[in-house]
Image (cartoon, coloured by chain):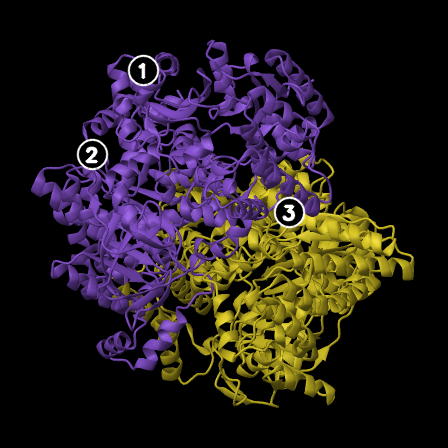
Chain colours: A purple, B yellow
Amino acid sequence: MAKYVYMFSEGTAEMRNLLGGKGANLAEMTNLGLPIPKGFTVTTEACTNYYDTGKQISDEIKEQISAALSKLEDLCGKKFGDPVDPLLVSVRSGARASMPGMMDTILNLGLNDVSVESFAKKTNNPRFAYDSYRRFIQMFSDVVMEMSKTFFENILTEEKEAKGVKYDYELTAEDLKEVIGKYKAIYKEKMGQDFPQDPTVQLMEAIKAVFRSWDNPRAIVYRRMNDIPGDWGTAVNVQQMVFGNMGETSGTGVAFTRNPATGENGIFGEYLINAQGEDVVAGIRTPQPITKLAQDLPQCYDQFMKIAHKLEDHYRDMQDMEFTIQEGQLYFLQTRNGKRTAQAALSIACDLVDEGKITPEEAVLRIEAKSLDQLLHPTFSAEALKNGKKIGSALPASPGAAAGKVVFNAEDAKAAKAAGDRCVLVRLETSPEDIEGMSAAQGVLTVRGGMTSHAAVVARGMGTCCVSGCTEIKINEEEKWFDLGGEHIKEGDYISLDGSTGNIYLGDLKTAPANIGGDFARIMNWADQFRTMQVRTNADTPRDAAQAVKLGAQGIGLCRTEHMFFEPERIHHMRKMILSETVEAREAALNELLPYQKGDFKAMYEVLEGRPMTIRLLDPPLHEFLPKEEEDIEALAKDMGETVEQVKAKCAELHEFNPMMGHRGCRLDVTFPEIARMQTRAIIEAAIEVNNEKGYRIVPEIMVPLVGEKKELKFVKDIIVETANKVKEEKGADIRWHVGTMIEIPRAALLANEIAEEAHFFSFGTNDLTQMTFGFSRDDAGKFLDSYYKNKIYESDPFARLDQNGVGKLVGMAVKLGRSTKPALKLGICGEHGGDPSTIDFCQRVGLNYVSCSPFRVPIARLAAAQAALNNK
Amino acid sequence: MAKYVYMFSEGTAEMRNLLGGKGANLAEMTNLGLPIPKGFTVTTEACTNYYDTGKQISDEIKEQISAALSKLEDLCGKKFGDPVDPLLVSVRSGARASMPGMMDTILNLGLNDVSVESFAKKTNNPRFAYDSYRRFIQMFSDVVMEMSKTFFENILTEEKEAKGVKYDYELTAEDLKEVIGKYKAIYKEKMGQDFPQDPTVQLMEAIKAVFRSWDNPRAIVYRRMNDIPGDWGTAVNVQQMVFGNMGETSGTGVAFTRNPATGENGIFGEYLINAQGEDVVAGIRTPQPITKLAQDLPQCYDQFMKIAHKLEDHYRDMQDMEFTIQEGQLYFLQTRNGKRTAQAALSIACDLVDEGKITPEEAVLRIEAKSLDQLLHPTFSAEALKNGKKIGSALPASPGAAAGKVVFNAEDAKAAKAAGDRCVLVRLETSPEDIEGMSAAQGVLTVRGGMTSHAAVVARGMGTCCVSGCTEIKINEEEKWFDLGGEHIKEGDYISLDGSTGNIYLGDLKTAPANIGGDFARIMNWADQFRTMQVRTNADTPRDAAQAVKLGAQGIGLCRTEHMFFEPERIHHMRKMILSETVEAREAALNELLPYQKGDFKAMYEVLEGRPMTIRLLDPPLHEFLPKEEEDIEALAKDMGETVEQVKAKCAELHEFNPMMGHRGCRLDVTFPEIARMQTRAIIEAAIEVNNEKGYRIVPEIMVPLVGEKKELKFVKDIIVETANKVKEEKGADIRWHVGTMIEIPRAALLANEIAEEAHFFSFGTNDLTQMTFGFSRDDAGKFLDSYYKNKIYESDPFARLDQNGVGKLVGMAVKLGRSTKPALKLGICGEHGGDPSTIDFCQRVGLNYVSCSPFRVPIARLAAAQAALNNK
């Protein structure tokens, strides 16, 4: 028979998966002999059992709960529902991972019409007793019965008005009795039955409610944001109530063993005398700093300090503790490893190493890799945020803080920068033509587009703050205004964006620059020692490449060549090339592009100072480069000696039904080998020249995209090798090169053993691989993915976090098959997933050589790679 | 050391893979003691070696050829290049599968300036000798050196003009000597060297040329059309020349042991006295029937007849033989199983069974499954085709022959039919709105679209002749005319389409109806006994379903429900449903559709008479149903009480970047569960009513499309089951149902073990699975697939023939994984591939329970399934 209920004395800190974080720590503290109110934990397995059996608590579990309750009564020397000295309990959620405030809690359970009387007598405090019962009825009705709070708030407000008082605490015991009567009446009216008087019924219903709260909408959203699986479930802790509101020798408080904002060593916390937790939250009274306790209740203070240090030493990490003092008696209600800012996390980890409490390996494992983002970008101070008026919120597409004057197009952004102004670019959506404007702006706000839209991807690459997909905006780009959150904002008005939260503020909020202190460098240095995977970056411009190198990138894993064609003097030749009808005309246009490409590659190689670079041949469908504006079409027609109609007709011919599955990637090189020839020439000539100038020994890595078949790769590779050999001969240079491919089409993964015969390396293009494996496109999935999250079909965005189950299976197959052909095959990942810690862990397990991510994610990837190496040793 | 060259005496008929069909049969006949000119075969492995080593014949192979040549000289008692009695040889291709006329041949090899003189003396026929040399130079220059034939034809024409004669044979030996001089001069001018005099050089170059001809463009196209792999290579047969043009006791001919057009038993053939093969082809003289040989050369005739019967008995099949008589001596140059019409194939196979020569199993294996198509559709007679003027050719999208007046839209087609006229519908492309018109027409011709375009798929389903993708057409649908092949064709003009060849003719060609004789039934009956897979059909209308049942379908494997919504009174409700903004409004519109759907399903069930039917829930993206015409939009707006602008805006919102990877399939049911509810209700109510009316025990099979995740299937299945149970209860009926899914997304195949937990059956939707696995869409791949065929990257259309290597790997995985969860899981295929014999063989090997294909492919599938069962026993 499975054990679904554990007394606190039966658990340990290691049983977190079964007992939840809170339950495991309560057990651990109980066993350390600390002053913990007695209680028991209903396990997470009971919760999953509840869901599996159609939201029922099985008889078996009910029996175990009853048995534990009997034990608890014995331990406390009190009886549930006792008319003289009743046992009262709290019922609290507690999942494996902390989900603060997401799930439900019920306090004062066990009170009923009879026991409230004895409780009043026993405590000699009728007002306190009736207030407890009132609160319990309200909480039970809300949480367990899902009645609207408004009914109860209205009754309370009416009572205060009737008695001519302002605050709840001004109501007398008699007033509260009246309130209780009205509460029970409205309960009966709405629920069709009396408020339950049997404490056992109250308890079972409360436990069910906590189980149910695991799946409330805000918990689902929180889990998705924090990568917490939906099938973990929550445990439920049933614990004897202690009261901090029983007079001047009672109180309640919260404290950290170190400062959670800065990491400074020293107890940091606050408390309130004669109060319960919710009074602290209500904010009517101002809490005291914890040091004041030494004066108020010196014995309790000493005991508290001793226990706090003991807990930190025991857990070897900064602790976040909740405590209550009932009539001079100190109780710990909770301890857990405290949440902290990224800066504090680094500082605490380094201090603990210096104090000899943890090893550098443990220090590295302690830092949440994703949190480093906070350190790499400007931020708003808490004060600035307090003063700013939030007018909306959308997707946190690229982290950082930005404030400036609103502009509505790239030209205006460039002009603002030239004039020395800070600006924020607001667009319906961005396109490759906006890149310069995005680079000139402090931040970018778009109406359309998700986390992997053009704006988001480019902004992350640049390290520019971006909030995307703010569909509530009503915008008129022509007239240069937009409406949001009831505000009408014109060009030149100030707004501020928080790219880490997605919030949008009115006005010019003050930003603080990125702060990469010594602790950061220490941790990263340890991480670099422990990790076994290389970390490269995805960068298409020297600026991005330089940024990434500064952040520790060991090379470029993906240099896309298409963005290079969008500058005004280039796009024109590109368009001519695309609309050419003969090989000769195409080659002529490509020849015009060659010097630009070569120049780009030289600049990249120079920035990299000999580090490797994987360059991907042209990938997007050609129609993406075609003009849409009438004047551009006219200019092109004139230059090509054709009519506007002819040019338009040719453009129309290039239309595709499903561009994502169309004429792109290496398919372009198969139909137009001259494109691969030009690009290869540019790459090899650039490498030779930089080698000669700087004395490097660059081995260019040329990557063929969208391969699905060995013969396809061989066809393009033959063109590359032939061209490269020709250049080598022309220049009399000593140069080598590698030719590899993206694995981004399911067929390529399935036949990786064959494809490896022709490849020096594989780079997993998990963006496209995810699209093809799921059969939905990033651009279109927005229309239905919300329904999928809501219905718990998918729990996380497969474009942000690799679907290890499905897409990962293909990746794993490809790794095995590829290495079966070439044991030394170099393997990496260059999709958006390359900077996601959980994906990096997967990459480590599956045996990749490197991950590649956008420049500002490089430190995250370095740390996550170290953690993956340590966790998978 | 590998053996690359075999003397004829060293081979057998079983060595076809190594020696090619011709080589193996020459060896077999040699060993049977038949009169065969001596020779040897260079193997297909030598050919693949030639390609693998960069188009070189290795030294090892050259040595083996030289050794075989020496043996041949000994056998013939003549020397290569001998100045007195030179050995002359033919060099012919011969692949594993017959590829008539696709590759190259060189005759009279061994002649040079010296040996031609001795050959003239030896044969005592200088004209014959010089003509042979002339022909050899011309053939060698053309085939081996790739010189244009025009140079030589011009010289010959000039010579004839100079001598005032009309035919080649009127030129004298002296004339031919002059011609030879000029031939050699032009050869030297163009090639920069003398015509090779060394017969060994001639031979090696000729062998290389034959190897090379394996990869000429017409051979590549032929292989693609006939599913012949590109890596087989061709063998080369080097054989002593015999001459049928050495006087009145010489001759040459071709004969079959049975009539290849009708199958009638009896030698059928023709011959020419004093002629070579090419004279027969030239058509200047009319060949004699073979029976005439009995009078001309009775001894040869008797010998021929004896050998012909011996060969048929030996090979136990109808033989196609080539023979030459040189001065009264009969030689067989070739025998092979003769090509025949489908009608003849059936007749011959049945006759051979009746004659006790083969078993029914062998008879079933003898019929090419694809060829049955010829029997199921009307055809043009050879005479009709001779009189018709061919004006163009495109894709043979749906077989059959059609002739009628041209119409340009569906309305006109319906009107023509109503008026009793035959018509051919010509469209830029068809859309679902054209279905009625397509059904009213004899045939359909489209300008755009491939073998799996809307027109093609629908026409095949209907059994209507269709030629698609005729991009050469210039069409104006408004003005009702099109131009093709220099003809201007207006509405009402007659054209004729051959859907089996893709040819388009001017005028009203006479068609002959389909002819399914007794032999057909006999063979199909045997096939049904031998096959282990079921054969179902893809049908959406009672008409198609009835047709399929008549052709032997055992049920419906795929009933698409979307076509049902396009009829005028329905599309309106459909559009209202799509544009509704509330669940209530959507449900109201769905309620209007319910009676139609139910009626459709009832009609289908009635036609099926209790046979099973798999119904797929709504699949396409909703925007496919939206109005495009202004007047339709206006009508809809009016009915919905909205402005035209509002309706247009809503339509625009439904736009998708990649509709194939968008909001479709079960994603519609996840976002709008009411759609699944309506469809389930229609299905279950229909089944219950038909069961009650007819006494069937129908178990509806409801198929959820586009599933990629178990939870997704479970979500939709829960809706289906809940609705079905509700209907069952309402009707008090005793009914069961099965819920299954399409496996058409790679992720579904990868996680088939999980998905099987929720599925009664899997149906492989290999159309979409191919798209996703290759990462290209059917609609867009046309732009680059031709380059892929040309460059031998892909050899066949993966949408017509399943890519067993890649997509097949996924299918195989899904079968294994699915059965690992549910050993009895029912598995089928319902993609376009379900009617393709090679795919059916794959389905048998991988263990599917059934295949499903369009109605007119059902007999093909039945036969192919029998063959697959026999071949994989």
User: Residue, x 35% and y 11% (percent of image)?
Assistant: A306
Snapshot quadrant of residue A346:
top left
Snapshot quadrant of residue B573:
bottom right
Residue situated in front as seen by the camera: A59 or A147: A147
The kind of residue tagged 1 is: Ile
Can residue B306 be seen? no
Pinpoint residue B815: horizontal percent, then vertical percent: 64, 40
Q: Mark 1 points at which residue?
A: A358
Q: Is mark 1 on a helix, strand or loop?
A: loop
Q: Calculate the distance from the C-alpha at mark 1 to the C-alpha at mark 2.
A: 23 Å
Q: What element carries label 2?
A: loop
Location of the N terminus of chain A (image quadrant): top right
Q: Mark 3 points at which residue?
A: B715
Residue A841 disc label: none
Residue A516 disc label: 2
Pinpoint residue B636: horizontal percent, then vertical percent: 59, 78
Q: Which of marks 1 and 2 is nearer the N terminus?
A: 1
